[in-house]
Structures are given as structure tokens and as C-alpha cells.
Amino acid sequence: MRDDKNLNEIRTIIARHKLWDFVFMIVGILALMIAMLTFMALFSHMLIDGLPRLSWDFFTSFPSRRPGSAGILSAWVGTTLVMLVTAIAAVPMGIGAGIYLEEYASKNLITEIIEINVTNLAGIPSIIYGLLALGLFVHQFGFGQSILSAGLALALLILPVVIVATREAIRAIPLVIREGAYALGATKWQTVSHHLLPYSAAGILTGVIIGLARAIGETAPIITIGALTFIAFLPPSPIKDEFPYISFEWLMAPFTVMPIQMFNWVSRPEEEFQVNAAAAGLVLVVMTLTMNGLAIYLRYRMRKNLKW
Amino acid sequence: MHPPQTVRPSTDAAHSRRLGYSYRRHLGERFIEAILFLMAFISVVITLAIVAMLVSESLVFFEHVSLWDFLTDTQWTPLFDDAHYGILPLVSGTVVSSAVALLVAIPLGTITAIYLSEFAPFAVREIAKPFLELLGGVPTVVYGYFALLFVTPALQKIIPGLPGFSLLSAGLVMGIMIIPYVSSMAEDAMRSVPMHLREGSYAMGATRFQTALRVVMPAAFSGIAAAYILGISRAVGETMVVAIAAGMQPNLTWNPLEPAATITAYIVQVSLGDLPHGSIGYQTIFAAGLTLLLMTLAFNILGHVLRKRYREIY
């Protein structure tokens, strides 16, 4: 009799715990849904507002006082050129730093300082990089409010991303590969350049893409260095008719980029401009999502195919 | 065992030239190592440059404005004729918007992390994780657009009298934006808790929820704390959402229903104008930036301490 009662008590306790388990599972799904649904709301809101505005003209027109004929030509050209500078500056530097920290660095104080520092850099708000670029590149180095200043500012910003991705990709290569190379008499650099870099290329590429996707969407540092919001001309062309055929004038040109163009339109009171903002935002989101999606896909492929 | 030169003495010299210690080859290796070291060291140079830049411009600023005024004055109107330089209104805006964001991001991020790490079936996790990662990649200016043109009008229906710019709607959207950062880091921490701890808990008859709450979370505490700290420093440093949706008027308030400027929004506002290099207005953004850097630095150090102190080693 007593045992029965005890057993029943235990059963209610178990039932209660199982109920909690179930309740939490529902709560978990709901929490996940909130993040996803918000994104859906955001995307569909922009789609409804912005899609009718997207046309060929939108990509080939300069911004204008009349919202109906305004476009994002100078913005996307600016973004492309700034990204070019960012990639050229950040990728070699980030990969080099990653290789050094993973393969060369001995355990000493300087290495530890560099490592802590890379972690800290990733935690510094992006607008602070803007202030650094404003003081250093724009005024001290005299680059002005140019594509070069913006590209370098964003390069500093994504440097930690590239470094961390490079380190992780290199760390994943098993030790036997290195030992095999050394056993054949390869030097350290030969081991790195013939084996470690090619094998980690996909991982590094993933990091670079994620970094650049972040840089494309960054607005704050570029506003801080004083990019103009209304640019109705293109930077000088990098290709010239006469010798030496290549010109670097565009590096020093004033510019605008996609997120700044969008910010400019959002902050205007007229509703027509906000439709433009939605269209620009749509382009921006599709651009960053494509890049991030590509990176995720690459990583997925790598995880699936990689068997050492 | 005979070395090869006894067999083929003619190639001996060539062999040792190619395989022996070569000064040139050695030098090349050292050169490459030095270059790689410089690339790694640049990150330290960047940090030093940031600190030097902010401190040097701020020092000039503090020659005009006393530190006491900066910390205690309740008005921030550096661009007006009657200039006041009290950082408090900007700090209050930053704190309130971050608090709202964290009230959203920490509970939702934690629940999402627990769900994904302990409850979700494999297929759900495989879909949800990349999706959350994509969410983290959406540009912040887009979230700002969303806060201003979607969330604020929606909130105005629930809370009549809510102004067009408010810390609440900026904070809410910022919170949603931060969820992926918090959840993915917290989930990584929980996933790295060894399986046998869970198995021990299940063997004692605990449910998944009990295991998650009493075994996995305490074991992963340092990682989860680090995720929260990352969320906090994201919220404090976030710029575009607050600049677009919270208004740019400095306002000493602790009420999220009011519009107010954050430190970051002020820097944006000044940068949009055309302030001459070297003017006091130009220096204010560096002083504001230094304040922001110190705030995030404090959180980063706290995170570092928490991680060291509560790290569980298996």
C-alpha cells in the first residue's frame, strides 16, 4: 500500500519533469522562431517596398534630388573599389600573421601579447576604427576622404577575422603532413608554401569571404572618415588610353558606398526616398547573404570531403 | 652503413651543395620569418595607434574642458554657442539602448543555445545554425531601416505616444541582431562539455532540461559568460541602428520610450557634418570614442577574467 503511494508520487514527479522538458522544448523552438521570423519580416518588408523600384535604371543612375530617378551607380562602384583596396590590404597581411602565429611563433611574451591583442581587436567597436582612420589616414597621412582611406580602415577592421580563419584552417592540418615534408628535407617556408597553404586554402577563403561580407555592410567607420553622401560622379577610371595605361587616381577620389547611400535615404523624411532605401537595402542584403552563404557552403563542402 | 659518397664520389660535392647547410637558403628562411612576424606584429601596432590617436586628441580636448565637467555636466551641447561637455547624456543613451538589447538577446540567445545544443534533432541544427549565422551577417544599416520603418510603427500601435525615434525600438532590434552572436558562442561552449557528464546525468534519471540546466550550463559557464560579454560589447559599440532609430539628440534619460543619442550616434552625427580638423568639435568625437573604448575594454577584461576564473578543465 505504502509502496504504491510512493510509486505514484514518483510517477507524478517524473511526469512533472517530463512536462517541463516538453515545455522547454517548445520555448526553445519559439526562441529560434523569433530570430527567424524577425528576419523574414525584415526581408519581406524590404521586398514589398523595394522590389518594384529595382530596375536596370536603378543600377545605372546617380543619386538625385528626385527620388524617382535616383539610383545607386556611384554607390556600387564605390563599394566595389573600396572592397578591392580592403582585400588587397587585409588578405596578405591576415594570412601572413596567421601563418606566423600558427607555424613560426615560439611561446614567448611577444607571441602572447600578439595573440591577446588579436582577440581584443575583434572586440573593438567598428566606429573606433573609423576614428583611427580619420586621424591617421585622412589627416596624418594626407590620404583625404578617399577610397584608399576607407579601404584601409575596413582592412584593419576585418584583419582579425582573416587571421583567426587562417589559424584555424592551418591548425586543422595534421602534424604528419608537416613531418612528411620535413623528412624530405623541405625547409619551413617550403613546408608552408607547398603544403600548408594549399591545403588550408578553402578554409582561409571562407574566412576572407566572411570578412569581406562584413566589410561591405559596415557603415559607421566610413561615415566617420567623412565619406560624402551625395556623389553624382564616378571615380577616375583605372584604365587609361595612353602609357602606362593604368592609373591610381581613383584611390584618392571621393566616393560613397552602398550602406551610406542607404543610410542617407533612410534618414530622409520623404516616403519615396525610403522606397529607394528599401531597394538599396535589398541589394545590400542579397550581396552579403550571397557571400555568407557561399562561405557556409564552402565550409560544409570542406567538412564533408576532408578526410586526412 | 655506408654513406652514398663511397658509391658515387663524383656527385658528392653536388649533393652536399644541394642538401647541406646553405647560408643563402638559411637567410631566405629568416627573411620570410621576419616578414611574417612583421605582419603579425601589425595587429599590435594597430592597437597602439588606436590608443595613441584617441588619447592624444582627447588630451587636447581636456585642455579646454575639465575632466570633472566632462564626467558630471548633465548636458552635451558641444556644437551650440552655449557649449556644455557632459558625457552623461550620451552614456545614459548607450546604457539604456544596450540594456534593452541585452534583455532581448541574453534570454533568447541562451534559450536558443540550450535548445540547439541539447534538444534539437540533427536536421534542425544543421538548418538553424547556418541560418543564424546568415542573420549575423545582415548589415546593421539594414537593421536600422527595419527598426525605424517597421518596428517603431508597430510599437506605436501598442504604446500610444511613442515618439518616432526611441531607444526602445532601437534596443529591441539591436537585441534581435545580437542573438546570433550570443547563441552561437554559448552553443559552442555547451557542445564542448564532454558527453560523459551528460551521460552521468541521464543515468541518474535526469531529463534533458535538468541536465542542461544543472550539468551542462554550469560546466560551460565560462564560455557562456564570454558569449554574454561579447553581446554586451556589441550592443555598446553598435552604431547604425541607434543612429537611425533612436534619434541623435543627446538626452539624459533612463526611459527607453524617449529618443536619445548614444556615444556612437553622436560620432556619426558630427562626422556627417563638416567639422574642420583641429576644432573642439572635432576633438569631442575622439573624447567620446575614448569613453566608448574604455567601456568596451572594461567588458573585455571582465570577460577575460571570468573565462580564466571559471574555466572547467576536463
Image (cartoon, rainbow, N blue to C red):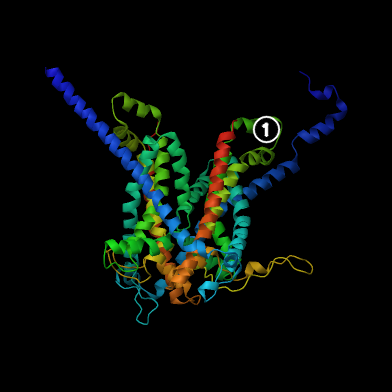
| Left or right of B65 on screen, residue B140 | right
Q: Residue at x 59, y 45 (%)?
A: A204
Q: Is residue A161 above or below residue B312?
A: below
* Residue with the most extreme left position: A1
| Left or right of A2 on screen, residue B265 | right
Q: Residue at x 52, y 49 (%)?
A: A114
Q: Residues within 10 Å of mark 1 (few under 14, many from 20)?
A: some
Q: Percent x, y for residue B270? A: 44, 72
Q: Is residue A114 above or below residue B70?
A: above
Image quarter hosting the C terminus of chain A: top right
Q: Percent x, y for residue B150? A: 38, 61
Quarter of the image for residue A137 reads bottom right
Q: Is residue A6 visible?
A: yes
| Left or right of A158 on screen, residue B230 | left
Q: Percent x, y for residue B189? A: 40, 39
Secondary structure state at the residue bearing disc 1: helix
Q: Is residue B300 visible?
A: no
- Between A11 and B314, the one lying in front of the other is A11
Amino acid type assigned to the residue bearing label 1 in the image: Tyr
- Between B38 and B9, the one lying in front of the other is B38
* Residue with the most extreme front position: A52
| Left or right of A22 on screen, residue A293 | right
- Between B253 and A152, the one lying in front of the other is B253
Circle 1 chain: A
Q: Percent x, y for residue A56? A: 60, 64
Say which residue label 1 marks. A182
